[in-house]
Image (tube, rainbow, N blue to C red):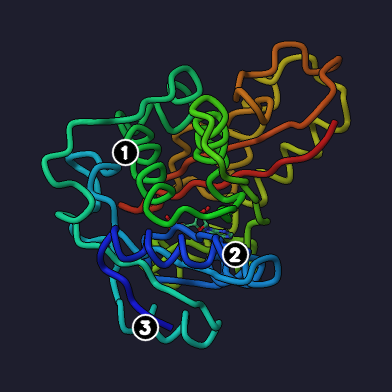
Protein backbone atom coordinates (compact mmCIF):
# COMPACT_ATOMS: atom_id res chain seq x y z
CA UNK A 1 0.00 0.00 0.00
CA UNK A 2 1.29 3.45 -0.91
CA UNK A 3 0.34 6.86 0.45
CA UNK A 4 0.00 9.46 -2.30
CA UNK A 5 -0.04 13.16 -1.47
CA UNK A 6 -0.09 14.73 -4.95
CA UNK A 7 -2.98 14.99 -7.39
CA UNK A 8 -0.72 14.54 -10.44
CA UNK A 9 0.77 11.36 -8.93
CA UNK A 10 -2.60 9.70 -8.23
CA UNK A 11 -3.79 10.72 -11.73
CA UNK A 12 -0.76 8.99 -13.28
CA UNK A 13 -1.32 5.87 -11.19
CA UNK A 14 -4.99 5.75 -12.20
CA UNK A 15 -4.14 6.27 -15.89
CA UNK A 16 -1.75 3.34 -15.70
CA UNK A 17 -4.35 0.96 -14.25
CA UNK A 18 -7.11 2.20 -16.52
CA UNK A 19 -5.07 1.61 -19.67
CA UNK A 20 -4.20 -1.91 -18.51
CA UNK A 21 -7.93 -2.64 -18.20
CA UNK A 22 -8.06 -2.66 -14.40
CA UNK A 23 -11.07 -1.31 -12.51
CA UNK A 24 -10.20 1.55 -10.17
CA UNK A 25 -12.47 2.51 -7.26
CA UNK A 26 -12.47 5.34 -4.76
CA UNK A 27 -13.74 5.31 -1.18
CA UNK A 28 -13.81 8.98 -0.13
CA UNK A 29 -13.46 9.52 3.64
CA UNK A 30 -12.47 12.09 6.22
CA UNK A 31 -10.52 9.44 8.13
CA UNK A 32 -10.85 8.19 11.71
CA UNK A 33 -12.03 5.02 10.05
CA UNK A 34 -14.58 2.67 11.59
CA UNK A 35 -16.54 -0.44 10.57
CA UNK A 36 -18.76 1.64 8.26
CA UNK A 37 -15.78 2.81 6.21
CA UNK A 38 -14.32 -0.70 6.31
CA UNK A 39 -17.51 -2.14 4.81
CA UNK A 40 -17.16 0.27 1.86
CA UNK A 41 -13.51 -0.73 1.41
CA UNK A 42 -14.44 -4.41 1.46
CA UNK A 43 -17.19 -3.95 -1.13
CA UNK A 44 -14.84 -1.94 -3.30
CA UNK A 45 -12.18 -4.65 -3.09
CA UNK A 46 -14.72 -7.31 -4.04
CA UNK A 47 -15.76 -5.40 -7.17
CA UNK A 48 -12.50 -3.80 -8.35
CA UNK A 49 -8.82 -4.53 -8.90
CA UNK A 50 -7.59 -1.26 -7.38
CA UNK A 51 -9.03 0.47 -4.31
CA UNK A 52 -8.01 4.01 -3.42
CA UNK A 53 -9.15 5.37 -0.04
CA UNK A 54 -8.98 9.14 0.22
CA UNK A 55 -8.42 10.58 3.68
CA UNK A 56 -9.00 14.32 3.68
CA UNK A 57 -10.79 16.38 6.33
CA UNK A 58 -12.28 18.86 3.93
CA UNK A 59 -12.34 22.34 5.50
CA UNK A 60 -14.84 23.77 3.01
CA UNK A 61 -17.71 21.55 4.16
CA UNK A 62 -17.55 22.75 7.77
CA UNK A 63 -19.39 25.89 8.87
CA UNK A 64 -17.57 28.53 10.93
CA UNK A 65 -19.00 27.27 14.22
CA UNK A 66 -18.64 23.60 13.38
CA UNK A 67 -16.09 21.02 14.49
CA UNK A 68 -13.37 21.23 11.79
CA UNK A 69 -10.58 21.83 14.32
CA UNK A 70 -11.64 19.14 16.73
CA UNK A 71 -12.74 16.57 14.10
CA UNK A 72 -10.97 13.33 15.16
CA UNK A 73 -7.80 12.56 13.22
CA UNK A 74 -5.40 9.62 13.58
CA UNK A 75 -3.53 8.90 10.38
CA UNK A 76 -1.39 6.09 11.83
CA UNK A 77 -4.50 4.23 12.98
CA UNK A 78 -6.20 4.80 9.59
CA UNK A 79 -3.05 3.61 7.80
CA UNK A 80 -3.01 0.37 9.80
CA UNK A 81 -6.71 -0.26 9.10
CA UNK A 82 -6.23 0.34 5.37
CA UNK A 83 -3.17 -1.90 5.28
CA UNK A 84 -5.04 -4.69 7.07
CA UNK A 85 -7.93 -4.31 4.60
CA UNK A 86 -5.45 -4.52 1.70
CA UNK A 87 -6.20 -1.09 0.31
CA UNK A 88 -3.94 -0.33 -2.66
CA UNK A 89 -3.48 3.42 -2.23
CA UNK A 90 -4.32 6.04 0.36
CA UNK A 91 -4.77 9.45 -1.25
CA UNK A 92 -4.02 11.94 1.52
CA UNK A 93 -3.51 15.42 0.08
CA UNK A 94 -2.69 18.52 2.11
CA UNK A 95 -5.28 21.32 2.04
CA UNK A 96 -3.02 23.45 -0.21
CA UNK A 97 -2.76 20.61 -2.73
CA UNK A 98 -6.56 20.54 -2.98
CA UNK A 99 -7.31 24.27 -2.70
CA UNK A 100 -4.51 26.41 -4.07
CA UNK A 101 -6.21 29.70 -4.91
CA UNK A 102 -9.31 27.78 -5.90
CA UNK A 103 -12.18 29.94 -7.23
CA UNK A 104 -14.53 27.24 -8.46
CA UNK A 105 -17.38 25.61 -6.56
CA UNK A 106 -20.13 23.17 -7.43
CA UNK A 107 -23.57 23.95 -6.06
CA UNK A 108 -26.42 21.51 -6.55
CA UNK A 109 -29.62 23.45 -5.97
CA UNK A 110 -33.00 22.45 -4.47
CA UNK A 111 -31.97 19.08 -2.95
CA UNK A 112 -29.50 21.00 -0.80
CA UNK A 113 -32.10 23.45 0.61
CA UNK A 114 -33.80 20.82 2.73
CA UNK A 115 -32.94 18.59 5.73
CA UNK A 116 -29.24 19.16 6.51
CA UNK A 117 -29.17 22.16 4.18
CA UNK A 118 -31.36 24.14 6.58
CA UNK A 119 -28.88 23.63 9.42
CA UNK A 120 -25.56 23.59 7.55
CA UNK A 121 -25.40 26.45 5.07
CA UNK A 122 -22.87 25.86 2.31
CA UNK A 123 -22.10 22.35 3.55
CA UNK A 124 -23.17 20.55 0.38
CA UNK A 125 -21.31 22.96 -1.88
CA UNK A 126 -18.19 21.99 0.06
CA UNK A 127 -19.05 18.29 -0.28
CA UNK A 128 -19.95 18.39 -3.98
CA UNK A 129 -16.84 20.38 -4.85
CA UNK A 130 -14.44 18.17 -2.92
CA UNK A 131 -15.96 14.94 -4.24
CA UNK A 132 -15.77 16.20 -7.83
CA UNK A 133 -12.13 17.17 -7.18
CA UNK A 134 -11.42 13.73 -5.71
CA UNK A 135 -13.08 12.10 -8.73
CA UNK A 136 -10.92 14.19 -11.07
CA UNK A 137 -7.81 13.32 -9.06
CA UNK A 138 -8.38 9.57 -8.69
CA UNK A 139 -10.31 9.04 -11.95
CA UNK A 140 -12.16 6.02 -10.54
CA UNK A 141 -14.60 3.88 -12.48
CA UNK A 142 -16.73 3.72 -9.31
CA UNK A 143 -17.07 5.34 -5.94
CA UNK A 144 -18.42 3.74 -2.76
CA UNK A 145 -20.60 5.75 -0.38
CA UNK A 146 -22.57 4.87 2.75
CA UNK A 147 -26.35 5.06 3.14
CA UNK A 148 -25.61 6.86 6.45
CA UNK A 149 -25.32 10.14 4.47
CA UNK A 150 -28.51 9.86 2.43
CA UNK A 151 -28.80 13.51 1.42
CA UNK A 152 -25.13 13.68 0.48
CA UNK A 153 -25.71 10.64 -1.75
CA UNK A 154 -28.71 12.30 -3.43
CA UNK A 155 -26.64 15.45 -4.04
CA UNK A 156 -23.68 13.51 -5.44
CA UNK A 157 -25.90 11.38 -7.69
CA UNK A 158 -27.46 14.53 -9.13
CA UNK A 159 -24.05 16.18 -9.56
CA UNK A 160 -22.64 13.16 -11.40
CA UNK A 161 -25.66 13.02 -13.68
CA UNK A 162 -25.85 16.78 -14.33
CA UNK A 163 -22.11 17.12 -15.03
CA UNK A 164 -21.84 13.89 -17.09
CA UNK A 165 -19.16 12.59 -14.75
CA UNK A 166 -18.07 9.15 -15.93
CA UNK A 167 -18.29 7.38 -12.60
CA UNK A 168 -20.65 4.83 -11.06
CA UNK A 169 -22.00 5.47 -7.57
CA UNK A 170 -22.46 2.50 -5.23
CA UNK A 171 -24.36 2.97 -2.00
CA UNK A 172 -23.59 0.54 0.85
CA UNK A 173 -25.77 -0.09 3.89
CA UNK A 174 -25.27 1.76 7.17
CA UNK A 175 -23.20 -0.14 9.73
CA UNK A 176 -24.51 0.13 13.26
CA UNK A 177 -23.39 -0.53 16.82
CA UNK A 178 -25.18 -3.37 18.60
CA UNK A 179 -27.65 -0.89 20.10
CA UNK A 180 -28.55 0.45 16.66
CA UNK A 181 -26.49 3.66 16.79
CA UNK A 182 -25.11 4.35 13.31
CA UNK A 183 -21.32 4.22 13.33
CA UNK A 184 -19.71 7.61 12.84
CA UNK A 185 -16.34 9.21 13.46
CA UNK A 186 -18.26 11.76 15.54
CA UNK A 187 -19.43 9.03 17.97
CA UNK A 188 -15.97 9.46 19.53
CA UNK A 189 -17.34 12.72 21.03
CA UNK A 190 -20.00 10.78 23.01
CA UNK A 191 -19.68 9.52 26.58
CA UNK A 192 -20.69 5.86 27.15
CA UNK A 193 -24.03 7.07 28.63
CA UNK A 194 -24.69 9.30 25.63
CA UNK A 195 -23.88 6.39 23.31
CA UNK A 196 -26.44 4.26 25.14
CA UNK A 197 -29.05 7.05 25.02
CA UNK A 198 -28.40 7.60 21.32
CA UNK A 199 -29.89 4.19 20.50
CA UNK A 200 -33.27 5.97 20.63
CA UNK A 201 -32.52 7.51 17.21
CA UNK A 202 -32.62 4.22 15.32
CA UNK A 203 -35.66 3.25 17.39
CA UNK A 204 -37.43 6.43 16.24
CA UNK A 205 -36.58 5.71 12.60
CA UNK A 206 -38.03 2.21 12.90
CA UNK A 207 -41.12 3.50 14.70
CA UNK A 208 -41.65 5.96 11.85
CA UNK A 209 -41.22 3.19 9.29
CA UNK A 210 -43.81 1.06 11.12
CA UNK A 211 -46.31 3.94 11.14
CA UNK A 212 -45.73 4.67 7.44
CA UNK A 213 -46.23 1.02 6.51
CA UNK A 214 -49.40 0.72 8.62
CA UNK A 215 -50.76 3.22 6.11
CA UNK A 216 -53.33 4.60 8.57
CA UNK A 217 -52.16 8.22 8.50
CA UNK A 218 -52.59 10.56 5.60
CA UNK A 219 -50.25 13.28 6.83
CA UNK A 220 -46.55 12.82 7.51
CA UNK A 221 -46.92 15.49 10.21
CA UNK A 222 -49.13 13.16 12.26
CA UNK A 223 -46.31 10.65 12.37
CA UNK A 224 -43.69 13.31 13.06
CA UNK A 225 -45.70 14.58 16.07
CA UNK A 226 -46.04 11.04 17.44
CA UNK A 227 -42.30 10.57 17.11
CA UNK A 228 -41.67 13.85 18.96
CA UNK A 229 -43.90 12.67 21.82
CA UNK A 230 -42.12 9.30 22.01
CA UNK A 231 -38.74 11.04 22.20
CA UNK A 232 -39.94 13.37 24.98
CA UNK A 233 -41.16 10.37 26.97
CA UNK A 234 -38.08 8.20 26.50
CA UNK A 235 -35.14 10.61 26.14
CA UNK A 236 -36.19 14.19 26.95
CA UNK A 237 -32.52 15.32 26.99
CA UNK A 238 -32.08 14.68 23.27
CA UNK A 239 -32.95 17.54 20.92
CA UNK A 240 -34.40 16.50 17.58
CA UNK A 241 -33.41 19.14 14.99
CA UNK A 242 -35.50 17.55 12.29
CA UNK A 243 -37.33 14.31 11.56
CA UNK A 244 -38.60 14.21 8.00
CA UNK A 245 -40.36 11.73 5.77
CA UNK A 246 -39.49 12.28 2.12
CA UNK A 247 -39.03 10.51 -1.18
CA UNK A 248 -35.50 9.17 -1.64
CA UNK A 249 -34.60 11.00 -4.84
CA UNK A 250 -35.42 14.68 -4.58
CA UNK A 251 -36.03 14.52 -0.84
CA UNK A 252 -39.40 16.24 -1.18
CA UNK A 253 -41.71 15.86 1.80
CA UNK A 254 -44.41 13.31 0.98
CA UNK A 255 -47.75 15.10 0.76
CA UNK A 256 -50.17 12.23 0.22
CA UNK A 257 -48.69 9.52 2.37
CA UNK A 258 -51.53 7.03 1.95
CA UNK A 259 -51.21 6.95 -1.81
CA UNK A 260 -47.43 7.32 -2.06
CA UNK A 261 -45.65 4.41 -3.72
CA UNK A 262 -41.89 4.11 -3.97
CA UNK A 263 -38.79 4.57 -1.85
CA UNK A 264 -39.41 6.41 1.42
CA UNK A 265 -36.54 8.07 3.28
CA UNK A 266 -36.90 8.97 6.94
CA UNK A 267 -34.05 11.24 8.06
CA UNK A 268 -33.23 12.87 11.34
CA UNK A 269 -30.63 15.04 13.00
CA UNK A 270 -30.33 15.21 16.77
CA UNK A 271 -28.15 16.85 19.35
CA UNK A 272 -26.91 14.84 22.29
CA UNK A 273 -25.03 17.25 24.52
CA UNK A 274 -22.85 19.19 22.09
CA UNK A 275 -22.69 16.39 19.54
CA UNK A 276 -24.82 16.52 16.43
CA UNK A 277 -25.71 13.16 14.88
CA UNK A 278 -27.60 12.27 11.71
CA UNK A 279 -29.22 9.00 10.70
CA UNK A 280 -31.81 7.69 8.26
CA UNK A 281 -33.71 4.65 7.11
CA UNK A 282 -34.87 3.89 3.57
CA UNK A 283 -37.58 1.43 2.55
CA UNK A 284 -40.10 0.77 -0.17
CA UNK A 285 -43.79 1.51 0.26
P1 LIG B 1 -16.95 10.33 6.41
O1 LIG B 1 -15.55 9.88 6.71
O2 LIG B 1 -17.80 10.45 7.62
O3 LIG B 1 -16.98 11.53 5.50
O4 LIG B 1 -17.63 9.15 5.59
C1 LIG B 1 -17.03 8.63 4.43
C2 LIG B 1 -17.99 7.65 3.80
O5 LIG B 1 -18.28 6.61 4.71
C3 LIG B 1 -19.33 8.29 3.40
O6 LIG B 1 -19.75 7.78 2.15
C4 LIG B 1 -20.25 7.82 4.51
O7 LIG B 1 -21.61 7.73 4.13
C5 LIG B 1 -19.68 6.44 4.81
N1 LIG B 1 -20.08 6.04 6.15
C6 LIG B 1 -19.98 6.78 7.29
N2 LIG B 1 -20.53 6.10 8.32
C7 LIG B 1 -21.00 4.93 7.83
C8 LIG B 1 -21.68 3.82 8.39
N3 LIG B 1 -22.00 3.76 9.68
N4 LIG B 1 -22.01 2.79 7.58
C9 LIG B 1 -21.70 2.82 6.26
N5 LIG B 1 -21.05 3.85 5.66
C10 LIG B 1 -20.71 4.89 6.43
Q: Report the residue marked by disc 2.
A: 40
How far across and how far down the image is residue 186, in percent?
39, 60
Q: CA distance from mark 2 to mark 3?
A: 17 Å
What secondary structure is marked by label 2? helix
Task: Identify whether 236 is placed above or below 208.
Answer: below
Q: CA distance from mark 3 to mark 1?
A: 26 Å
Q: Which mark is residue 98?
A: none
- Determine whether, in the image, residue 176 is placed left or right of residue 92: right
> Which quarter of the rendering shows the N terminus?
bottom left
Please rate how many residues cluster around mark 3, counting C-alpha atoms within 10 Å: few if below 14, some from 14 to 19, many from 20.
few
Considering only order in the chain, which callout, 3 or 2, is on the residue closer to the N terminus?
2
Q: Report the residue marked by disc 3.
A: 77
Furthest residue in direction front, as rendered? 19
Q: Report the residue marked by disc 1.
A: 126
Considering only order in the chain, which callout, 2 or 1, is on the residue closer to the N terminus?
2
| Residue found 58% across the figure and 53% down from its top | 141
Q: Quadrant of residue 30?
A: bottom left
- Determine whether, in the image, residue 208 is placed left or right of residue 104: right
| Residue found 63% across the figure and 19% down from its top | 253
Task: Identify whether 214 is placed above or below 270.
Answer: above
Q: CA distance from mark 1 to mark 2?
A: 22 Å
Q: Quadrant of residue 8?
A: bottom left
Is label 3 within 8 A of ligand 1 (CB to nearest ligand atom)? no
Q: How many marks?
A: 3
Is label 2 within 8 A of ligand 1 (CB to nearest ligand atom)? yes
Residues marked 3 and 1 touching at CB (< 8 Å) = no
Residues marked 1 and 2 touching at CB (< 8 Å) = no
Camera-side residue: 193 or 249? 249
Please rate how many residues cluster around mark 1, counting C-alpha atoms within 10 Å: few if below 14, some from 14 to 19, many from 20.
some
| Residue found 37% across the figure and 53% down from its top | 137
How far across and how far down the image is residue 160, in percent?
53, 34
Camera-side residue: 170 or 110? 170
Amino acid sequence: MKVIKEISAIQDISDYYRCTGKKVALVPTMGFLHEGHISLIQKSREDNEVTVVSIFVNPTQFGVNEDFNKYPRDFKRDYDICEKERVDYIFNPETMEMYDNSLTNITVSEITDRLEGKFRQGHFTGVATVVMKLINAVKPHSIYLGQKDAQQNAVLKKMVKDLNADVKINICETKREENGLAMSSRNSYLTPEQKADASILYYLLNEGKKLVLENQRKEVNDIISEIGITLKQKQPGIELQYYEITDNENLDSITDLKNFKGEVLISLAAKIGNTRLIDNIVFTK
